[in-house]
Image: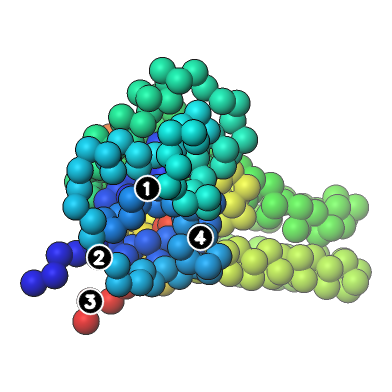
Amino acid sequence: MQAIMQIFLARNNVQAGPYTLDQLNIMLTSGEVQLDDLIWHEGLDQWQRVGNLTNNQTFYRPAHIATPAVNDSIINNVTVFPEDADASNGQDDKSVSLDRLYGKPERLKDNAKNTKSDMTTNRQYTPNSNVSLNKSNATKATDKVVGNVVLAPIMSRVLATALNALLYLLAIFPLVMALTKLDVDYTKFQNIQDMDTAYQYSMTLMESIPSSTLMISQVMVFGLFALQLLFITLRGQSLGKLITGIRVVDQTTHRLPSFLKLIGMRTLLLFIIYNLLFSFTSFLGFVIIGIHYYMASKSPENIGWHDKLAKTLVVKADSSQLVKEPKIK
């Protein structure tokens, strides 16, 4: 039985892996692995630039090559640094060092030897220790990490909600400005039991507003809702979450949730619930939102009642979360 190829990657002196060939090709397609990253697997006598092995394509199909005997001379020359050029006469000119690849200043030889040792002696990582190569996902000491995702800070989620509310206010701004010019009797909306009277009065107000203003407001509101639904469906992000760099993912797979969870549970159902709450009193709606974020702040995984309802997490956005897992044949 042929052993599964174990592939190691490196960028900015950080090694990641092992990965399978299928995982590598998925990450190449999504852009998480770049052609300028370094790669090593059994059969290579030194680290190589990914693009050199793939002919600068986003798909790697290694040629059948005999696996050389692993000895000290090969291990000691896996990572090639500029200082070692004179000592490696038989190395491939296309091999690119980490320093040379990312434009870093040359380090002292002692540091180079230490890094070389780290890159060669730490190959045997387990798959659970895979490190994301996406530069935008550098984690801070205060970040909460669950599996391979970084949880979104509570304040980022609050800001995303505030931005969505602001976008809605901007969409209805023409209508609000038109209503301020009318003599509105707000007491007619205070008696919830007499909804028919309130409805008739609202229709009278709408007839008093210029049709062009109504049309502009309707186009802006429906356009905003269409954009929100599009981004939520395709990216798991409302416009507010897109701006703040966070995303909704499934609690189990840490990938984009199903359409039912995204649109049915987290969008339409919540929209109906909060519309009903705000129709009674705006204070009640804000209280429920506050309870949600309070629950999230006390949860180890930042899970509020929205997340419990849909079985989702809100995390820092990463391109790998949008990649569909390959189906097992």
Whether residues under marks 3 and 4 lie with C-beta atoms below 8 angstroms apart, the answer is no
Q: Mark 2 points at which residue?
A: 66
Is 251 drawn above or below residue 13 in the view shown? below
Mark closer to the chain start, 4 or 2: 4
Q: How crowded is mark 2: few (under 14 residues within 10 Å), some or many (20 or more)?
A: few
Q: Name the residue under label 4.
A: 52
Whether residues under marks 1 and 3 lie with C-beta atoms below 8 angstroms apart, the answer is no
> In the image, what residue occupies the spot 80% across and 54% down?
173
Q: Inspect the image, locate mark 2, and give the three-letter code of the amino acid beneath it.
A: Ala
Please provide percent x and percent y for residue 99: 54, 34
- Label 3 secondary element: loop
Q: How far apart are marks 1 and 4 (CA)?
A: 13 Å
Q: Distance between the residues labelled 3 and 2?
A: 29 Å
Is 30 drawn above or below residue 131 in the view shown? below
Mark closer to the chain start, 2 or 1: 1
Q: Can residue 279 be seen in this view?
A: no
Looking at the image, the residue that sits furthest to the bottom is: 329
> In the image, what residue occupies the spot 28% across and 58% down?
43
Mark closer to the chain start, 3 or 4: 4
Please provide percent x and percent y for residue 65: 29, 67
Q: Mark 3 points at which residue?
A: 328
Mark closer to the chain start, 3 or 2: 2
Q: Distance between the residues labelled 3 and 4?
A: 30 Å
**Front in this rendered view, residue 311 or 211:** 311
Please provide percent x and percent y for residue 124: 20, 43
Q: Is residue 56 visible?
A: yes
Q: Mark 1 points at which residue?
A: 46
Q: Nearer the viewer, mark 1 or mark 3?
A: 1
- Label 1 secondary element: loop
- Label 2 secondary element: loop
